[in-house]
Amino acid sequence: MSLRMLGKDPESKDGGSPTVYLDDETNSYLVQGLKVTDPERRSLMNVPGHEDVVEIPRRMVQFFLEVKGDDAPHA
């Protein structure tokens, strides 16, 4: 498996989260963030039991390749 870190939240207090990764083998994004546990917010989504939802700040969108227009990692 080949995971590339595309970027961490520049405003994270401890520098550890949230983070956006790209899995080159599956051509998929992996997102590390805060787990959404608020029942009211979860009730607005149809989340199957084998899936979960994480939250990242809007500013993290800059790390997705389609927005950046390239495939170079940005930390």
Image (cartoon, helix red, strand yellow):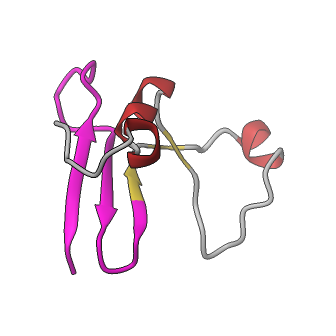
Above or below — where is 55 with respect to 31?
A: above
Q: In this view, does 20 lie to the left or right of 39?
A: left
Tell me the quarter of the image containing the N terminus.
bottom left
Residue at left offset 82%, top offset 47%: 43
Q: In this view, does 16 lie to the left or right of 24?
A: left
Closer to us: 19 or 64: 64
Above or below — where is 12 with respect to 5?
A: above
What residue span does the magenta drawing correspond to?
1-29
In the rendered picture of this protein, how many numbered marks are placed on residues?
0
Q: Is residue 17 left or right of residue 38?
A: left
Percent x, y of residue 73: 19, 46
Percent x, y of residue 62: 39, 32
Query: Which residue is farthest front?
Result: 69
Tell me the quarter of the image containing the C terminus.
top left
Above or below — where is 5 with respect to 19?
A: below
Percent x, y of residue 29: 41, 60
Residue at left offset 43%, top offset 24%: 59
Please identify the quarter of the rendering in which residue 60 is found. top left
Closer to us: 12 or 21: 21
Residue at left offset 20%, top offset 48%: 72
Residue at left offset 58%, top offset 60%: 52
Closer to us: 60 or 72: 72
- Does the stretch in magenta take in 61? no
Percent x, y of residue 44: 83, 44
